[in-house]
Amino acid sequence: MYTPPFFKQDRAASLRFAEERGFGTMCAFDGQQPLASPLPFYLTYAADGTPQAAFHVARHNPLVKLADGAASWLLAVNGPDAYVSPDWYVSPDQVPTWLYQSVHLSGPVRLLSDAELAVQFETLSDKFESWLLPKTPWTSAKMTAGRFEALKKAIVGLVMTVEEVEGSFKLNQHKSDADYAAIADALGEGDTDARKISHLMRQARPQIFADDTNKLERSVP
C-alpha cells in the first residue's frame, strides 16, 4: 500500500482497526488473474504474538485451492470514506481528494481442520452477535440437531498468518487547522460515511473544535 508519512498508522493501531472492523476483501493470485472475496473475519494471536486472521469461505470458492500455506494473500480492510470538494477549503488553489481509512494484512493462508473450523465458526458468530447486545446471542445450539453439521460441510475454514501490516488513515492531517476544520464541518453535513470521517477528524484534533463544543454546551438549557 502506498502510504505518505502523514497518513501512515503504526502496527498496533492498524491491527486494532482491522479487528474492530471485522470485514474485508481477501485477495489471492492463481497464476493468471487475481481472485477476491468479501468476508467477515476475526484476529487471534499465536503463542509468539504473531497475528492470525481467521475466516471461512464456501467450499466451491476458487480461493480454497490456493490455500497452500506458502503463497501470500492480501486482506484489505476498509472503513468509511468521503469525497472532499476544493470549494470547502479556506485556502485557495486546492484540488479534489478523498479521505478514508484502510488497512492491509498479508501473509500465507492454510486450511483448517474440521475441529478448528467448528471453533472458528462459534468464535466468529460470538464476535458479531456481541455487537447486538442486549439481544440474546445466537449460537449454533439453536439449530435443529444435525443441521449445523450438514451446513458446515458446505464451508472451508482458513487462517492467514499475518506477516505484514500496513495502515493508511487519510484524514487531511497535513492541512492547516483552518482548512482542517472547514473540511470536518462540511463533511459533518454529508452522508453517513462523511459524518464518520468528520467525527474521526474532530477526535484527532479536538483543540481546534473546542469553541464549537463550548458554544453547544452554553446553548443547552
Image (cartoon, rainbow, N blue to C red):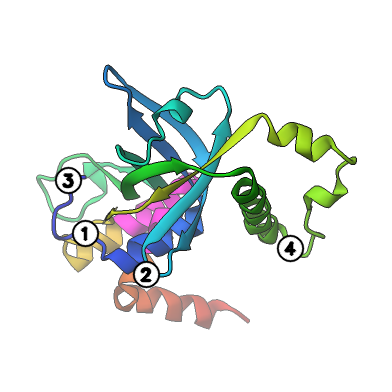
Residue assigned mark 1:
8
Residue assigned mark 4:
133
Residue type marked 1:
Lys
Residue type marked 3:
Tyr
Q: CA distance from mark 4 to mark 3?
A: 38 Å
Looking at the picture, does residue 210 appear above or below residue 110? Answer: below
Residue assigned mark 3:
2
Residue type marked 4:
Leu
Indicate yes or no whether the magenta region holds residue 75: no
Q: CA distance from mark 1 to mark 4?
A: 33 Å
The outermost residue toward the right is 144
> What residue is at 29 percent from the left and 54 percent from the top?
163
- Examine the image and state in which quarter residue 98 appears: top left
Label 4 SS? loop
Expressed as whole percent of the image width and height from the top left, the position of residue 215 reads 45, 78
Q: Residues within 10 Å of mark 4 (few under 14, many from 20)?
A: few
Does 213 sit left or right of 12 as displayed? Answer: right
Q: Nearer the viewer, residue 78 or 46?
A: 46
Question: Which of the two discs, 2 and 1, labels the residue nearer the N terminus?
Answer: 1
Q: Residues within 10 Å of mark 2 (few under 14, many from 20)?
A: few
Q: CA distance from mark 4 to mark 2?
A: 33 Å
User: Which span is picked out in magenta?
Assistant: 183-201
Question: Which of the two discs, 1 and 3, labels the residue nearer the N terminus?
Answer: 3
Q: Which mark is residue 48?
A: 2
Label 1 SS? loop
Question: Which of the two discs, 4 and 2, labels the residue nearer the N terminus?
Answer: 2
Indicate yes or no whether the magenta region holds residue 197: yes
Expressed as whole percent of the image width and height from the top left, the position of residue 194 reads 42, 48
Residue type marked 2:
Asp
